[in-house]
């Protein structure tokens, strides 16, 4: 049996810019495991975080290579460009970019929002409830363990399966459906957001930015014309995408640099947002993560008063 392969939902080319140490060619970050009991923040190789076994694998493809085409698509078409666009974004001398470079920037940020398990989890929540209903009806009323469409066609047949087997099968199908959906949405969303402006904000804060396994912030659903999108790209820089303002060239990179006091206030708020949004992993500098945990704890206690 082939050993499962862990596939990164946040690419290593992104993770390494939050590294706290480098040994030979390996990058390490301090990591808080959000669902653990207690607070323990070990230093971990970026190879071992923000990944899910076989998340991008398609079961029914004819060969091992074909099964993992999506992982290779991300590697070759998005991740391979990241180092060059990152260097442009943090280079204060870069004021204007080409449409081609802008396309690459948008593709990376939007794909990062899409490639996390959020869509699959939403589908799982829906199908799990449906399966619960079908199996409960079977036990209580003796109905079939089947689901039909409105026009009477058989949609699902769980006659030979336990409830756990049915859910496992459907979750696996949902994972593959959601991954196809993400790729099909990507091109349209990049086109939709191409008129957006790019702003890079630099923070001169004693507290560094942290990130997570869900690093992209969106103010509204992605398809909304007024949606603002943000992504920390290292400990000091945040990239923001926002709707077009007519009197500004949309190929210009707008830059803002905040002083120490304003930076610290903003970074603490942004880090709390990352901690709240994270599912499993929060990473960066240990002291910055600890400070964020303390800040969030303080806010939650204050809200309860």
Image (cartoon, rainbow, N blue to C red):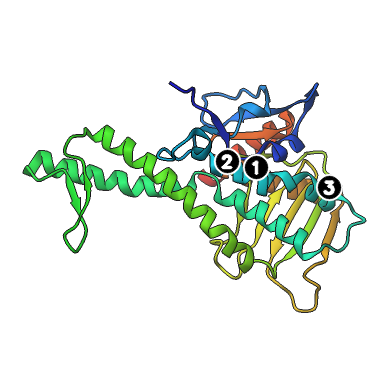
Q: Return the residue nearer the eye: 79 or 27.
A: 79
Structural crowding at the residue carrying mark 3, measured as other residues with C-alpha within 10 Å and reported as few (<14), some (14–19) or many (≥20): few
Residue 129: x and y in percent read 28, 46
Q: Earlier in the sequence, mark 1 or mark 3?
A: 1
Vertical order, 100 against 249 (above or below): above
Of badges 1 and 3, the one in the foreground is 1
* Residue at the spot 56% in from the left edge and 34% down from the top edge: 7
Structural crowding at the residue carrying mark 2, measured as other residues with C-alpha within 10 Å and reported as few (<14), some (14–19) or many (≥20): some
Specify whether residue 305 is in view. Answer: no
* Residue at the spot 79% in from the left edge and 48% down from the top edge: 86
Q: The N terminus appears in which quarter of the rendering?
A: top left
Q: Return the residue nearer the eye: 184 or 29.
A: 184
Structural crowding at the residue carrying mark 1, measured as other residues with C-alpha within 10 Å and reported as few (<14), some (14–19) or many (≥20): some
Identify the residue under disc 1.
Answer: 75
Most distant residue in the front direction: 62
Identify the residue under disc 3.
Answer: 87
Q: Secondary structure at mark 3?
A: helix
Q: Secondary structure at mark 2?
A: helix
Q: Secondary structure at mark 1?
A: helix
- Label 1 – label 2 distance at C-alpha: 6 Å
Identify the residue under disc 2.
Answer: 71
Specify whether residue 176 is in view. Answer: yes
Residue 241: x and y in percent read 70, 61
Most distant residue in the left direction: 142
Q: Return the residue nearer the eye: 241 or 177.
A: 177
Q: Is residue 1 left or right of residue 261?
A: left
* Quadrant of res 209: top right
* Quadrant of res 249: bottom right
* Residue at the spot 64% in from the left edge and 66% down from the top edge: 193
Residue 254: x and y in percent read 82, 63
């Amino acid at each position: 049996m082939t050993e499962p392969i862990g596939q990164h939902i946040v690419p290593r080319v992104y993770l390494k810019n939050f590294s706290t140490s480098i040994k030979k060619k390996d990058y390490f970050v301090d990591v808080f495991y959000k669902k653990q009991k207690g607070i323990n923040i070990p230093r971990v190789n970026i190879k071992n975080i923000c990944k899910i076994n076989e998340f991008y694998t398609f079961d029914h493809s004819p060969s091992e290579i074909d099964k993992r085409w999506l992982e290779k698509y991300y590697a070759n078409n998005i991740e391979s460009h990241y180092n060059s666009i990152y260097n442009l974004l943090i280079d204060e001398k870069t004021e204007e970019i080409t449409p081609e470079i802008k396309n690459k920037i948008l593709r990376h940020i939007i794909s990062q929002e899409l490639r996390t398990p959020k869509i699959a989890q939403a589908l799982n929540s829906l199908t799990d409830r449906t399966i619960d209903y079908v199996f409960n009806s079977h036990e209580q009323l003796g109905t079939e363990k089947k689901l039909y469409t409105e026009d009477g066609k058989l949609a699902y047949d769980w006659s030979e399966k336990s409830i756990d087997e049915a859910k496992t099968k459907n979750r696996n199908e949902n994972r593959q459906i959601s991954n196809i959906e993400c790729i099909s949405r990507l091109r349209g969303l990049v086109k939709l957001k191409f008129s957006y402006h790019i702003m890079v904000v630099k923070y001169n804060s004693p507290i560094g930015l942290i990130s997570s396994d869900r690093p992209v912030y969106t103010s509204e659903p992605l398809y909304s014309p007024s949606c603002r999108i943000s992504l920390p790209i290292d400990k000091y820089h945040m990239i923001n995408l926002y709707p077009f303002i007519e009197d500004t060239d949309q190929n210009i990179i707008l830059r803002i640099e905040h002083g120490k006091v304003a930076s610290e206030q903003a970074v603490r708020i942004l880090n709390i947002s990352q901690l709240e949004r994270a599912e499993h992993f929060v990473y960066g500098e240990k002291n910055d993560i600890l400070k964020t945990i303390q800040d969030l704890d303080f806010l939650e206690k204050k809200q309860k008063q």
